[in-house]
Amino acid sequence: MRGLTRAGKRASEMALNAGGGTINWFPGHMAAASRAIRDRLKLADLVIEVRDSRIPLSSANEDLQPVLAAKKRILALNKKDLANPNIMNMWLDHFQSCKQDCISINAHSSNSINQLLGLVELKLREAILKEPTLLVMVVGVPNVGKSALINAIHRIAISRFPVNDKIKRATVGPLPGVTQDIAGYKISSQPSIYVLDTPGVLVPSIPDMETGLKLALTGAVKDSVVGEERIAKYLLSLLNIRKTPLHWERLLHRREGFDEEPGDRSVKGSRDSLRRRNRLNNSDAVYVQDLVMEVQRTLCSTTMEFTGNLDDDNELEGLIDAQLVALRKVFRIPHKPLDESHGPVSKKLLTLFRSGKLGPFILDDLPGQQ
């Protein structure tokens, strides 16, 4: 784990130079929305703060942490299926050592959501004697899976209660004598616990380029704001500095599905085999699997053929450019000038990373292990 923060900063500096210029990360109206959430938080008896498991720290809103820390709070590290499970366990231990309730979840797994709701009910036991109705609010920065979590809770609420109780309104008030109706999903009867049906969208805190690029890489910042090529170069910088492509060396001996010369008979045979398997599976799953393996092989082979110094930024940038060129063939990008072809290659590479096809990653570093 040591040295990864230095690697991240170096990769972010290279991406900044590649893109040229500063970045206006978020429009002003999003900041206004975050300010409005502060008022709504006064109504909540418990807050579920959703973060991305791949960036447990970078996906937090630091400005709002003092407010959140004053509430009963559960950190829900979502998209755990995209994060390295061994390192994820270390993060859970870290938050527990900080006396912070934390759980890793997959918002698309009912078992995972039931575990989260069980923790919610456990944390609210102390408040049962004080309030007959309790309210839970879900907050988080963009694209951490708040809406997926809300939808999953809605489905569980429907399964738990009769039709008349599917969707109810909880009457709550931040101050004595002041009440407010808020639509929510009932998840418990004793006491009555409701989860707000509208998640709070927070603006991420972006103190530096490294944090901003991590958020962009995981999709919390729109690609159009940063530029797909800049984000892809940041990803390749991280992979190369961490020597990740070398972990895929075993794939060099399992070459099938794509390759070098159009007239190569083995390539033709493997393509025919691929088409047959696609027909048998009636899906794109086999094609995607073979595509991912070819991307990993290409990144591995270009890294092994690289004779320069990875500690030299200029030479590392040359390796990244060579990798983007090599991936152009893998992704079947039509022949264009190099500058024009990097965009389509970057887009496809980012899609594979964000869907977890390239493997599970955690981009943030554990405090104290930098």
Image (cartoon, grey):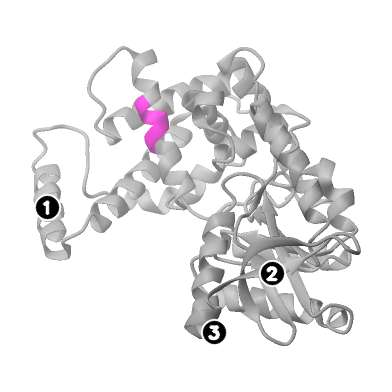
Q: Is any part of residue 3 visible from this angle?
A: no
Name the residue rendered at 91%, 64% in the picture.
Answer: 176
Say if 80 sits above or below 161 in the image: above
Name the residue rendered at 62%, 75% in the picture.
Answer: 186
The label on residue 92 is none
Dots 2, 1 in contact, CB < 8 A = no
Q: Residue furthest front?
A: 177
Closer to the N terminus: mark 2 or mark 1?
A: 2
User: Magenta stretch mostly in which secondary structure?
Assistant: helix
Say if 337 sits above or below 147 in the image: above
Dot 1 crowding, Cα within 10 Å, few <14, some 14–19, many 20+ = some
Dot 2 crowding, Cα within 10 Å, few <14, some 14–19, many 20+ = many
**Residue on which the image places disc 1:** 275
Secondary element type, mark 1: helix
The label on residue 160 is 3
Closer to the N terminus: mark 2 or mark 3?
A: 3
- Numbered range of the magenta stretch: 344-348
**Between 134 and 212, the one nearer to me in the picture:** 134
Name the residue rendered at 59%, 40% in the picture.
Answer: 220
Name the residue rendered at 22%, 42% in the picture.
Answer: 258
Question: At which x and y percent is residue 38?
Answer: 80, 47
Question: At which x and y percent is residue 140?
Answer: 68, 50
**Residue on which the image places disc 2:** 170
